Amino acid sequence: MKIKRFVAPDMRTALRMVRAEHGADAVILSNRRTEEGVEIVAASNYDEDAVQRALLEAQRATEPAPRPNPFLAPAGAQVQPPAAPAPRPDFAAAMAAALATPTAQAVSAGVAPAEAAAPAPVQASPAPVAVAEPAVAPAPPGAAAPALAPVPTPPAPASDEQLEAMREELAQMRAMIEREMHRLTDERLRGSPVRLQAMELMEDYGFDAGITRDVALQIPPDTPLHRGRGLMLGLVSQKLPICPVDPMDQGGVIALVGPTGAGKTTTIAKLAARFVAEHGPRDIALVTTDTARIGGREQLHGYGRQLGIAVHEADSDAALIQLLQRLQDYRVVLVDTAGLGQRDRALASQLNWLRAARQVSTLLVLPANSHYADLDEVVRRFSAARPQGVVLTKVDETGRLGSALSVVVDHQLPLTWITDGQRVPEDLHRANAASLVLRLEDLRRAADKPNVPEHDHAVA
């Protein structure tokens, strides 16, 4: 039997070294990771009986002597206290002490038995012998107690960098497992023709993969193919959160927030025009905080003059609070905030204005012609304003309405109004789940329709 130790940077290299040295019949006795890398102890021509005999002899050599029974001792005999047991040697020492033969010496040296039989010019070192610690006699009464051995200190806790690395690794593993589970779920869903049709349609409409997967799972796999689209649209409409009450009917202060170019000012003009047509201009007031942008206040003042509504300005949180106190007798006060990007540093200051002015209902304006990831970021950045609902604008400018609807479903923000044009107030509609899902196909076809230029007309 030949035993040898191998050290390599990684496990694969260590196993390659074992195979090259001992062949395919090598037996791995132990493996562990050290500062040098991976350590493997392997053997060839492995003799299990010899190893078992060596271990048995080492165990017998280290067993303590039987303790005498004081009750069975002869009368008058003095019973000696048992000596302290010697420490048990480790596995390597026991093997070296038991295998004190030429073959064992060859094994411990890492050479074959045939090589060990030949006379060697250098004498092999003696086998290591375990040295027992001297027994400690019990201290007499009144003597000072011996000093206790120092208690080993526990290992220091991992540093913040190590903990952060572990958290990041766990997050990556979780994301990988989720992706794999989603992939397996998609493969299973695509095995059903009706589910495959629903998933392809929802992908064409722009829906996110999460809501697409949830809807497809609710469709029975044996549903007839001609009923799949209608069932899919019905399930999507059930997921859409719709505000049951019109915020304009409730009254109060309503502030519209959202990113740049979302259509907040035009939407306020449509809401004001709708209110004036039903209740008159005396019970509504307009407020703008967009005093820094060129042309911002002028646009709202122009709408106010056309509708006969007073327009007020506030350039700070204190000015906004005082202004709202003066306008508390109005039934409805619409506040137009400055259009800021979701990563603008001034966004936090603007949201603090609205939190300082209490009893303000906030509505988030989302443009439907934006990508899912961008809309999701907008919702997260404006979450500090605690919006009570969503106004979905520019519905006529997108062919993939499912992207905006997916964000609304994921964050469970109730839809209040829908705008699909520039006309005031004709292009403002109360949100309705059934009408939204029915427009999905029309919007997709309109976006995919080729652009046919108008024919040139001859001038007479």
Image: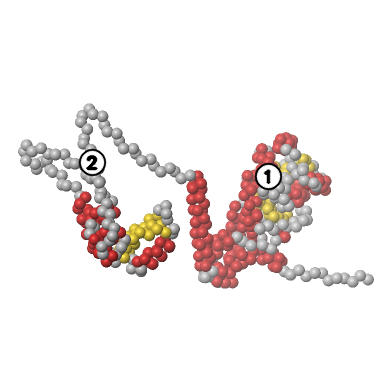
* Relative depth, front residue between 353 and 103: 103
Residue that label 1 marks: 345
Which quarter of the picture shows residue 68? top left
Q: How is the image coloured?
A: secondary structure
Q: Which residue shows up at 16% across the image and 39% down it?
A: 81
Eye-nearest disc, 2 or 1: 2
Rounded to the nearest angstrom, the CA distance separating label 2 from label 1 is: 74 Å
Q: Element under label 2?
A: loop
In the rendered image, the quadrant that contains the N terminus is bottom left
Q: Please state which amino acid type lies under the numbered disc 1.
A: Arg
Q: Is residue 200 visible?
A: yes
Q: Left of 37 or right of it: where is 419?
A: right
Kind of residue at badge 2: Pro
Q: Earlier in the sequence, mark 2 or mark 1?
A: 2
Provide the secondary structure element on which disc 1 rests.
Answer: loop
| Viewer-nearest residue: 139 or 306 | 139
Quadrant placement of the C terminus: bottom right
Residue 393 sits in quarter: bottom right
Q: Which residue is mark 2?
A: 134
Name the spot of residue 64 as percent of width and height, x first. Answer: 19, 47
Q: Residue at x 43, y 42 (%)?
A: 156
- Labelled pair 2, 1 in contact (Cβ < 8 Å): no
Q: Which residue is depicted at the point 46% across and 45% down?
A: 158
Residue 186's x, y, as percent?
53, 65
Tell which residue pokes out farthest to the top in this image.
Answer: 142
